[in-house]
Every structure is written in structure tokens, then in C-alpha cells.
Amino acid sequence: MKELNIKNIDFKLPIEVVAFQYSESCPTMQERLNNIEPIFISGHSISVFMDWLLNGKTKNYWKQYLEDMQCTYIDSETKKSPFCIIMPLVVFRFEFCQWGIDCSNEETQLLLHTLFEKTKDWKNKEVDLISINLYFNT
């Protein structure tokens, strides 16, 4: 597996934030919630997002999720396999999008605030986890 580094990211494809929940029939499995539209991060915002993910002030709080990153399926549209960083919704919203953003630049603050707001009602829609899907250059 390639090292998670901004130089390895394919900027032609967006980063997706996708909603999941634990399966009621098999709690160790996660199911994608197709009724919730994914959030797409594209263009320059990919660099902003990745910089916060890899270098942000509170990066150590979600480090374990980066270490568990895994390739899980083949995307039918891109024919590529995204690398998925799966974390609880509450970790994404409050640790990733909120903690330490006062130490970041205005551009990062705006992106994180937008992500926080776009996921505000996800808990009410029974979202347990999110998957940050990104693609490496081939």
C-alpha cells in the first residue's frame, strides 16, 4: 500500500465523505446508507483537507483511523479502489472538524465548518460511521 501522503493523492477524483451504520443483523458489519448523499471534496479543497488530516494540530486524535485505512472495494464508475478511512461520526464531527481549528488558517476553518454543518443531521438519520474515500495516483 502506498504511504498516505498528499503527493500520492489523485486530484482528478474527489474525496468522498460517505455515511454508514452498523448492521442490525450483524453488528460487526457496516452498511452504506445510500439514502444520504455523500459529501464531495474536490479541487484545491483536497489539499486543504489532506493538510489538516495529515498535519493539523489535533492529527494524533484520529491517527488510529489513518493506520486502519484500507482498500475495500472497486468503484464501478472509476474502476479504481478507494482507500477508506473509517471513523465514528462523532469523532469526525467533533474531533476532526472542531478541535484545534482556531489554530488553522481561514481556508481550513471554512472547509471544516462546512463539513461539520453538512453532517449536522446525519446522527438523526442513524449514521454511526463515516468513510473518507480517497484515491491514489496509479
Image (cartoon, helix red, strand yellow):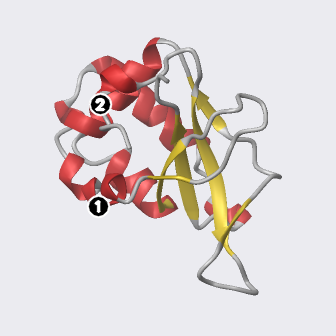
Under circle 1, the secondary element is: helix
Counting the numbered discs, the total is 2
Earlier sequence position, callout 2 versus callout 1? 2
Instruction: Tell me where residue 115 appears, x and y as whole percent.
Output: 51, 38
- Which of the two residues, 6 or 76, is positioned nearer the viewer here? 76
The furthest residue to the right: 35
- Quarter where residue 40 is shown: top right
Q: Name which residue type carries label 2.
A: Asn
From what the image shows, is residue 101 above or below residue 62?
A: above
Q: CA distance from mark 2 to mark 1?
A: 16 Å
Residue pictured at 36% horizontal, 58% vertical: 65
Residue drawn at x 66%, y 68% as measured from the top left:
21
Instruction: Please determine whether, in this image, residue 11 is positioned above or below residue 26.
Output: above
- In percent of width and height, residue 85 lies at 46, 51
The secondary structure type at the circle numbered 2 is: loop
Labelled disc at residue 30:
none
Residue 81 position within the rendered picture, expressed as x and y whole percent measured from the top left: 60, 40
Q: At 63% from the left edge and 36% from the top edge, which residue is drawn? A: 39
Task: Please tell me how crowded label 1 is: few (under 14), some (14-19), or many (20+) other residues with Cα within 10 Å.
Answer: few
Mark 2, residue position: 5
The residue that disc 1 covers is: 64
**Left or right, residue 82 beside residue 50:** right
Residue at left 35%, top 48%? 96
Amino acid tagged 1: Gln
Looking at this view, is 109 or 20 the one in front?
A: 20
Q: Is residue 72 left or right of residue 106?
A: right
